[in-house]
Image (cartoon, helix red, strand yellow):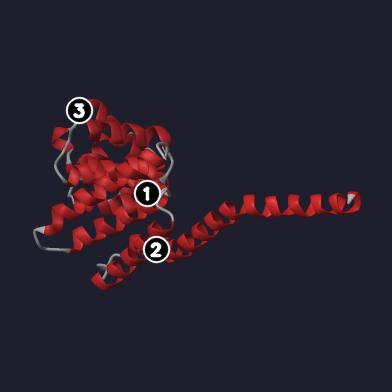
Amino acid sequence: MAFSAKYSFPRVLAALVILASIPSIYFAFRWALADISAYPVRYSIERWESQRNPVSLAKIEKAEADIDVALSWNDNNAEYYELKARILFYRAVQTESDDYLQYIRQALALHNTALLLRPNWPYSWANKSLMKAYLGEIDDDFSEAIEQAAKTGPWELSANLAVLEAGLLGWDQLTPELEALVLAATSRASEHGSNAVRVLLDRYEFRSFICSLLEPSSHQKKMCKETL
């Protein structure tokens, strides 16, 4: 009897360990499936950001379907909400219907959800400011988003570009403090992406004006060379 008890204890312990690990294995499996679905979405958006041609509706719908699958497996991942928000933004700028503002509002709500899950992520703050600007809501939430983007990711190029575009959209309503933050984001972005900054400034016909406000530097001269 003692012999049986001696050797049954390791089996019981092993069984308990296996049972205890089942939830971890289950969630790891779900997260793996979620990331498999999200992986192509990340790189699709990267390609979209680097190309000048409009993104087809079919590609947008495919990316949205993929990120919805990712969220169905893991609905606690801030990045997935942010990716879906960015997809909806692309859908918004592609549409000419009254759904335009609806997609922007949905994207804003998703960025807010992402920030609840990951409050120190500069891309979410920067893109929140951009969505607010597209909606014409230059308010305290807009100001906070720009301030937090500068605080949490001062050297993130895409965050600085989003802040710059948000600032250009709402320039007439900016306080001097916000103007300074937008100009600082412009200056930092020009150090690593002067062409991208120039494209944005030219799109909104702001290059001469913004260039006149920036501190002289080699990056500023490169970006503004046609206007200085």
First in sequence, mark 1 or 2: give its number. Answer: 2
Q: In which quarter of the image is residue 213?
A: top left
- The answer to which of 104 and 24 lies nearer the viewer is 24
Q: Can residue 32 be seen in this view?
A: yes
- Residue 175 is marked as 3
The residue at 54%/57% (across/down) is 26
The residue at 87%/50% (across/down) is 6
Q: In this view, does 84 lie to the left or right of 139?
A: right
Q: Cα distance, mark 2 to mark 3?
A: 37 Å
The amino acid pointed to by label 1 is: Ser
The residue at 36%/37% (across/down) is 149
Badge nearest the viewer, 1 or 2: 2
- Name the secondary structure under disc 1: helix
- The answer to which of 82 and 152 lies nearer the viewer is 82
Local packing at callout 3 (Cα closer than 10 Å; few below 14, some 14-19, many 20+) is: few
- The answer to which of 73 and 46 lies nearer the viewer is 73
The amino acid pointed to by label 3 is: Thr
Q: Are marks 1 and 3 in contact (CB under 8 Å)?
A: no
The amino acid pointed to by label 2 is: Val
Residue hosting label 2: 41
Q: Do the residues labelled 2 and 3 touch (CB within 8 Å)?
A: no
Badge nearest the viewer, 2 or 3: 2
- Name the secondary structure under disc 3: loop
Q: Is residue 214 visible?
A: no
The residue at 22%/52% (across/down) is 202
Local packing at callout 2 (Cα closer than 10 Å; few below 14, some 14-19, many 20+) is: many
Q: Cα distance, mark 1 to mark 3?
A: 23 Å
Q: Where is residue 98 in the image (x, y as percent from the top left)?
A: 8, 58
Q: Cα distance, mark 1 to mark 2?
A: 17 Å
- Residue 158 is marked as 1
First in sequence, mark 1 or 3: give its number. Answer: 1
